Amino acid sequence: MKRRTLLAATALAIGFGGAAFAQDKTKVGFVFVGPIGDGGWTYEHNQGRLAVEAEFGDAVETVYQESVPEGADAERVLTQMALSGADLIFTTSFGYMDPTINVAAKFPDVKFEHATGYKRADNVSTYSARFYEGRAVQGHIAGKMTKSNIVGYIASFPIPEVIRGINSAYIHAKKVNPDVEFKIIWAYTWFDPAKEADAANALIEQGADVIMQHTDSTAPLAAAEKVEGVIGFGQASDMAEYAPSPRVTSIIDNWSPYYIARTKAVIDGTWESVDTWDGISTGMVGIGEITDAVPADVKAEALAIKDAIGAGEYHPFTGPLKKADGSDWLAEGEVADDGTLAGMNFYVEGITAEIPN
Amino acid sequence: MIRLEKRPTPSRFWMAATPLLAVALTMIAGGLLFAALGKDPFEAIRTIFWDPLFNEQFASYSRPQLLVKAGPLILIAIGLSLGFRAGIWNIGAEGQYIIGALCGAGVGLAFYPAEAWYIFPLMVIAGALGGWAWAMIPALLKTHFRTNEILVSLLLVYVAEQLLASMALGAMRNPEGGGFPGSRNLQQYPAASNPELIAGTGMHWGVVAAFIAVIFAYILLNRHMLGFQIRLTGESPRAARFAGVNPTALTLFCMGTSGALAGLAGLFEVSGPAGQISIDFNQNYGFTAIIVAFLGRLHPIGILLAGLLMALTYIGGELAQFMLGLPAAAIQAFQGMLLFFLLGVDVLTNFRIRFGRSEVA
Amino acid sequence: MDLSAINPLVLMASIMVAATPILLAAIGELVVEKAGVLNLGVEGMMITGAICGFAIAVETGSPTIGFLAAMAGGAILSLVFGFLTQVLMSNQVATGLALTLFGLGLSALMGQSYVGVKPPATDKLDLGPLADIPVLGRVLFQHDLVVYLSLALVLVVWAVLKYSRAGLILRAVGENHDAAHALGYKVIRIRLMAIAFGGACAGLGGAYLSLVRVPQWTEGMTAGAGWIALAIVVFASWKPGRALLGAYLFGGVTVLQLNLQAAGVAVPVEYLSMSPYLITILVLVIMSADRSRAALNAPASLGRIFHASN
């Protein structure tokens, strides 16, 4: 019992100390699941961290830890970060959900922000991006650009976020090209360049001339580059080194505005626990430059879709839509609610594959 | 001309002095590495080795965490050391750890959401049995077909990893987990959880088991006939056979024990600190434990200390990363160096360095 | 499901490319193990080769120089292992594991400024009319130099081990180091050379990943390929020809499952992925159970420490 009070007292002291200290310098911590050199997911989160440093200069200090395994180690890293006097900590992977909640309960004065999760507390916010909005733009380009009418899709894990992306891309490809067909490979990894390259090659060999990916390395683009007439898209990062072709555009995870806003809220003392799910409208989902490899009219249409989504005039999941099993989902003009999207576990009509489980 | 001459008996002085020498050498080499990365080497070394133990800001938390991190390493390494002493090479503890965790967690999840006192003990038994059974595969293949146990036990690690992925994505996936891979969190299921026993100490059942294993291994090796047989088999298999040692029984015992302990470690980890079965919840504890076993010179007390040292570099490494901005890779390279030096200077325990020309040859 | 979408010729060619890194690493490790040394640090040497090759290729603009640098990098790292295990007589299993840990860390440090950089392209070897031969042309004659090099290496290692005096000595050292020493062979020197050769092969295999197959540099990009190479050596029962078969089997399973998925077949990915390991265990059991073929077994001195008593 004595030790517990000691720990609590320490936590309390640090918490108060941190708050007092915050008047001159706010400490912001980041916990990353991969190395900051992964060129994708973690790289972009680290860009957000750097943006916070650039924005506030000497008013903030940022610390980070990379390649933190999900589970026991994450909980320790978070606790040590909180003990070191962090005022705000971003945990940037789904697997950090329970550790974040556990540690947050021990440090009521430290603010936590957990990416892509669904558990919140008074001092834990969640945030995520509507990547499927970007998929709609890509789907349109894919449907227009494919000559073989086969689009290859390298998926990571069969989770709602990835399934949403496939559906959104398919709906918009199908809209402009009724003959389009999606071939989907589940790589069961977020990041394994060799496997992603193999997957891209398998798709290309089976006739796909547009490769979409929901994995984080540039390997699929490198594979596409080797074959004449195959295009692909940047994922998470802009991957501009493969422009103008095969990379014709990209979905960029731009966390900077959110990280800056949340850090400012802590500095101003206005931070509250919120659930943020932003997309193109706030810039959290960025669309990389559409290159000249895309015909001007297609480019204009794609940008129009982007602008309509950004302005809130158009929702990528607008009825009439049916599920793959033939049952009705959305009636004419009806838009999907966030609850259904958050737990999406079905394909829309037209995708012939099955979701593995 | 420098040459090595075998000592008649291992030097007791060097047995104690080599680990200190190795740590000192690592500090020098590591300091150079950190300096090359533009960090203050003294501060980095202090953060890794001193702060987790004595820094007032962290120590009250990170000191108990040493036990959490070292517990599974010690538990597995103790089991492995028995076989290693007898020349039986189980290097697949990683697989046995995974299977133990899967079996134990499987039992716990099967009872969900029932609350009963017997659930956790059943899980412990299932975990030990799972690890034991997985180790029995290479053991039986060795005793019946003379198949090399190093290779079979290593190959079974990959099979276990694939099973783990299959379970995390399929059979054991949390139905309320939003479709993400990973099981229910056992920490939130009291009947199946392995909590901290005394708050703030880091002690959970796995750490308790590790300490018990150290004591038992010590008694076994020093006071028991079986321990004598293990040591004799390692030193001279032929003499052991004349002395009436049954090699088949010994192989089954050593492999089985190491498998069961690795399985237990997996079960305690998954129901405690890790909390859930996820695709990569195994963090190479099984492989790291092999290194720990050798760093501890295959001696129970040595393994205890080696496990704690290893844990210290992990936790100190984490502190150095976010306090000083050292990249994770630098810590990894630093740990590799520490191991190289520890393994390398061990030569002084068993050999004398002689300068000058060899007189015998 | 549309299996007709899979072109077996194209598939075979893909498997050859996918198998090249693990084949190179496996053939190197095979020689090391034939000399009686078990180096579990293949993964560490591969990843070090991957970054050495990548960095030098980017700096010089020449993939060929990159490949040479990768071999040098892998060999130098392997000699750390060689020094510890041969001269200081440390345990090979533990030292090999430490080598992997160190190699992963070191490579990540070296590669910090090479993330997101595009390497110079490695050209396919122009074999002129050969490439246009139907069927065979697509499978065999449209690859880059390293693919052919890996095949040639299999042949050379096979011939040297089987027919040359050097191969005989190497095997003698691996089977019984005390007897080889009594015959006057320099056991430690021979083993160090074998270890360096293994390191160079692993490094080349790593560079093939970072320069050709992926091609880019990212931390941890070998993703377990080194461990697969170790399994292949066992599968091959220490025979170079079977290592080729093993590499194509292990590489093939990955490529095949991806192709089946793309064709719309619901494959149990995990069970397919574990099958080569189970087959390897089976091969191992059959091999060791048959007493008449005991000669095919693991080198007798594998993993044992050698110290000349005088």
Image (cartoon, coloured by chain):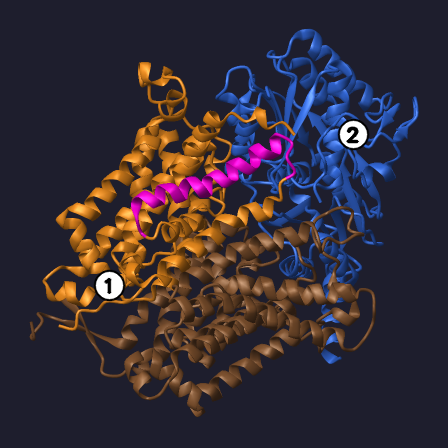
Chain colours: A blue, B brown, C orange
Secondary structure at numbered mark 1: helix
**Residue at (52%, 40%) from the top-left corner?**
C254
Q: Quadrant of the N terminus of chain A?
A: bottom right
For this rendering, which residue is in front, B184 or B46? B184
Q: Is residue B209 left or right of residue C297?
A: right
Q: Say which quarter of the image contains residue A310.
A: top right
Marks 1 and 2, how far apart in space? 63 Å
Which quarter of the rendering shows the C terminus of chain A? top right
Q: Which mark is residue A282?
A: 2
Residue located at (57% from left, 67% from top): B52
Amino acid carrying mark 2 in the image: Thr
Neighbour class for label 1 at 10 Å: few (<14), some, many (≥20)? Answer: some
Name the one closer to the observer, C51 or A18: C51
Q: Secondary structure at mark 2?
A: helix
The answer to whether residue A210 is above or below residue A14 is above
Dot 1 amino acid type: Val
The residue pinned by badge 1 equals C87
Return the x and y of residue A273 as percentages of the image width and height. 84, 48
At horizontal 50% and vertical 45% (from top left) the residue drawn is C223
The answer to whether any part of residue C76 appears in the image is no
In the rendered image, residue B345, in percent from the top left (x then y), is placed at 31, 69
Name the subunit of mark 2.
A
Q: Is residue A299 above or below residue B181?
A: above
